[in-house]
Amino acid sequence: MLGIVAIFMFFACILYVIFGQVTVRKLRKSPKTKNVLGLEFVSGWDIINVAQALAIPRSWSRKLEKSPLSSMYANSDLLFGNTTKLDRMLGAVFYWLLMISGLSAPLIIFMNDLGFIQG
């Protein structure tokens, strides 16, 4: 099972680079969107912020944008207005693949340590 998660992580890494080069690079160059990509903790974190804004339901994004920590999140309304359907689909696939593989690996390791998984 961990091998399957590793394959998902590999594809998430490839999609990270593709999404960053295709979509986020375009958004960084646009004067309207370059300042609404969210807080960048480390280089490239804005790629994950943009993917999250495009992948999660709009109501959740709006709730995050109204919170006291709103500067940490990308502005989904502006991003939806400045991206294509292909950009949104690529962002959603990348984000959910990253989240599923990133959360599954520690969960599988933990369950293996507890003895729920034999192998």
Image: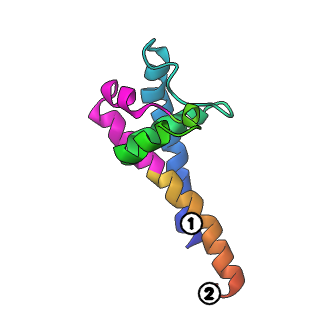
Q: Is residue 27 above or below residue 108?
A: above
Q: Which residue is mark 2?
A: 116
Residue at the spot 46% in from the left edge and 35% down from the top edge: 19
How crowded pointer 2 is (Cα within 10 Å; few <14, some 14-19, many 20+) is rated as few
Where is residue 50 drawn, in percent x and y?
47, 35
Query: In this rendering, is residue 95 above or below 39?
Result: below
Residue at 40 percent across and 34 percent down: it is 76
Quarter-of-image position of residue 70: top right
x, y percent for residue 38: 55, 30
The quarter in which the C terminus is drawn is: bottom right
Closer to the chain start, of discs 1 and 2, is: 1
Which of the pair 40/10 is nearer the observer? 40
- In the drawing, what numbered circle is on residue 94? none
Q: Decide which of 21, 69 is in the foreground and name it.
A: 69
Q: Is residue 14 magenta?
A: no
Q: Which quarter of the figure is the N terminus placed in?
A: bottom right
Would you identify the image quadrant in which residue 84 lies? top left
Asked whether 78 falls inside the magenta stretch, the response is yes
In the image, what residue type sits under mark 1? Ser
Q: Residue at x 49, y 24 (%)?
A: 36
- Residue 68 locus on image (x, y percent): 58, 37
Helix, strand or loop status at disc 2: loop
Residue indicated by mark 1: 104
Q: Which residues are magenta?
A: 74-95
On screen, residue 30 versus residue 71, left or right, reads left
